[in-house]
Amino acid sequence: MIKIITVGTIKEKYLKDAIDEYMKRLKKYTNIELIEVKDEGLVEEQKAMQLEAEKISKYLSPKDYIITLEIEGKSFTSEEFSEKLNQIQIENSNIVFIIGGSYGLSNEIKEKSKLHLSFSKMTFPHQLFRVFLLEQIYRAYKILNNESYHK
């Protein structure tokens, strides 16, 4: 089971369509769930991250293998990511990816993470990043199953 917990909601139809497409494709390989929690908006940074952390924590279990998406995290090639995902799944039935809000993630959430993952040193819109993450998870399964798509 893979859960993706994200801060904020998607309003743009083209992004919703892309997310729905990858969610549909991934169902062939795994149970997957996308959970959106409310973005606290432009309140004081620490306060927003704390409130968002409380909402995220409601969806976490001690059995979860938590992966946080962070600029400071570890980067992988698509092949390395697919192998890492495979290794994690062998030992863990629940994998949770967490995408923070505009201020990022609180230290409380980062401390629960077993893998701090970075796609780039660049900053991306959080709504668009959901599509990137879903696409890379899909690509990882295609690689693991030796199916065409990757190249």
Image (tube, rainbow, N blue to C red):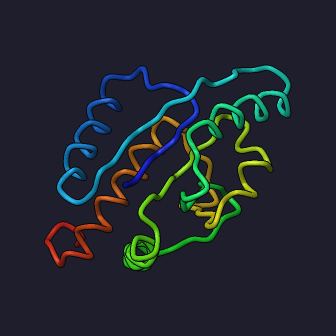
- Please identify the quadrant where the N terminus is shown: bottom left
Give the vertical position of 14 relative to 11 (above or below).
below
- At 36% from the left and 51% from the top, the residue drawn is 134
- Count up the numbered dots: 0
Give the vertical position of 88 relative to 19 (above or below).
below
Q: Position of residue 132 (x, y in %)?
A: 41, 50
- At 44% from the left and 43% from the top, the residue drawn is 130
User: As rendered, which of 124 and 103 lies closer to the eye?
Assistant: 103
User: As rendered, which of 31 and 116 lies closer to the eye?
Assistant: 31
Residue 47 picture quarter: top right
- Check the image and name the residue furthest to the front: 62
- At 29% from the left and 51% from the top, the residue drawn is 31
Q: Position of residue 49 (x, y in %)?
A: 76, 35
User: As rendered, which of 121 and 73 lies closer to the eye?
Assistant: 73
Q: Position of residue 135 (x, y in %)?
A: 33, 54
Give the vertical position of 126 relative to 110 (above or below).
above
Is residue 17 shown left or right of residue 125? Answer: left
- Please identify the quadrant where the C terminus is shown: bottom left
Q: Position of residue 117 (x, y in %)?
A: 59, 63
Residue 68 picture quarter: bottom right
Is residue 37 shown left or right of residue 146? Answer: right
- At 27% from the left and 57% from the top, the residue drawn is 30
